[in-house]
Amino acid sequence: MSSKPARPRSIASELVFLFTLSSAFLLTCGLGIFYWIVVRHAFAEDNAVMADKMSAVKAAIETNRGPQGLVEELKRSRSGEQATYWIRVLDSARRVVAETPGMGPLLPAASFPKPLPIYANTLTPTNHEMGGQLFSLVTVTATFNGQSYTVQLAQDRSADRQLEFEFAILFASVLVLGILASAAIGLSLTKRALRPLTKMKSALERIKPSHLSERVAPIGWPAELQPVALAFDDMLGRLESSFKRLSQFSADLAHELRTPLANALGEAQVTLARARTSEEYRSVIESTAAECEKLSGIVENLLFVARADAAREEIKKTQFDGRAALEKIVAYYQPIAEEQNIAVVCAGEGRVLGDSVLFSRALTNVIDNALRFTPENGTIRLAIAADSDQSRISVSDTGSGIAGEHIPRVFDRFYRADSSRSTSGTGLGLALVKSIMDLHGGSARIESELHRGTTVVLTFPNPA
């Protein structure tokens, strides 16, 4: 059972997510710091006020009034449920001397911490929760007429805790709304930022196989998309060139195959029109066989070039004597050259790293072209030179040469600089040479001048 293909990753979703995540992080940090500062400041203010209150109570006891002076004042205070501060004074025997009405049941004396020294505006109260209310408790000692008293002070912090809770709710609400707003803003900005991609997509969709001459044009696109537009234009240029070459190749191939087929068919039809002698039949069969050999050569060369283009594995290379291989090829062509009064000479020494069979096939095609276009009493020079990096074989002739506008295309299949000059060739020779050099990782280069001759240079890499 085949599984569903994974859903492609969305750049827009990823951008919105990252933008929202970044905004949430910044909002959380900012609001968290603000919340901590506000709460800390509120508690610090309450502690300062509580310290002032304790200092005043202690001062009142230690003056001439003594603890009894607080009794009447505390009696006049409001009930404990409504009071903000609760005060209790204990003597050395832990008896209550004075306290805020209602303090006993709500805040027993045992719930307060041990007495600590008090300094101006400095307190470290202890928090205590009783009956659903939060209190800050502090205990100090005071002295009057040599008698030691314990002063217990409590402050109701329930309002502060409620404020802290409400502020936390506000903080969370602002955070959630901020995240939602960030997501909405990120979505809007992402859609706006990616709008050029949609336009580029529409522009590319308009390009059809019959309109490969159209271009995206990098002008007008954002800086980030200009390299993409340039890459697309380069790709379209290569595709247009490939389509043109493929169309030309198809036309040339049809022409090359049509001619020998038409010749063979025509001769057969003419021969069959009436009775012929055995010699005439033999002549027709020989002519047909020659046309079939030509067709076979075309097909064989095409198959070799196609296999070379699709090759994925490296060929087996060996080191061999390049000069000896050249002399062997020259010896094969020497009778043909002598018939045309063409001199073929070799020069140089060097070893070549490559496939010796393919090497001979490439040089055979180059020399065959040189013999075809070199006039009588001409010269063909083969030279080899090698160093630690590469081996170069050059084949120069004193033939008619090639015009400059044709040189970039001489290695194309079926291309002929002047098809009227030769009917025996198929236009596949140099294409085959180029494929062989590509298999070796080398290069084939041609230099030519009209009426002065042509030089083909084959370079074989020779790594140490």
Image (spheres, rainbow, N blue to C red):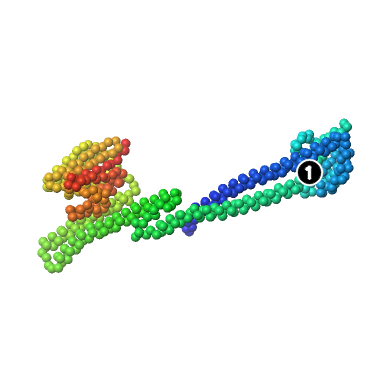
Q: Residue furthest bottom?
A: 274
Residue nearer the viewer, 62 or 100: 62
Which part of the image, by quadrant, shows the C terminus? top left
Q: Is residue 33 left or right of residue 5?
A: right
Pinpoint residue 87: horizontal percent, then vertical percent.
Answer: 83, 42
Residue at image point 76% right, 45% down:
157
Tell me if I can see residue 303 in this picture.
yes
Q: Residue at x 84, y 45 (%)?
A: 103
Mark 1 surroundings within 10 Å by alpha-carbon count, few (fewer than 14), some (14 through 19), many (20 or more): many
Q: Quadrant of residue 341?
A: top left
Where residue 153 appears, as percent x and y from the top left, is 81, 41
Q: Is residue 277 above or below residue 6?
A: below
Q: Kindly identify the amino acid type of the residue bearing the numbered disc 1.
A: Gln
**Is 231 displayed left or right of 79 in the figure?**
left
Query: Which residue lies at the image location 85% right of the left edge and 39% below the top edge?
Result: 89
Residue 267, position as x, y percentages in the image: 16, 63
Horizontal and vertical percent position of residue 164 = 71, 47
Observer-nearest of 411 and 362: 411
Question: Is residue 192 placed above or below 40 in the rendered structure?
Answer: below
* Left or right, 214 with reference to 27: left
Number of marks:
1
Q: Would you say residue 430 is visible in this rendering?
A: no
Residue at image point 26% right, 53% down: 413
Q: Residue furthest top?
A: 146
Relative placement, left or right, of 20 versus 136 is left
Answer with the quarter of the image where residue 345 lies.
Answer: top left
Residue at the disc numbered 1: 155
Question: Of helix, strand and loop, which one carries label 1?
Answer: strand
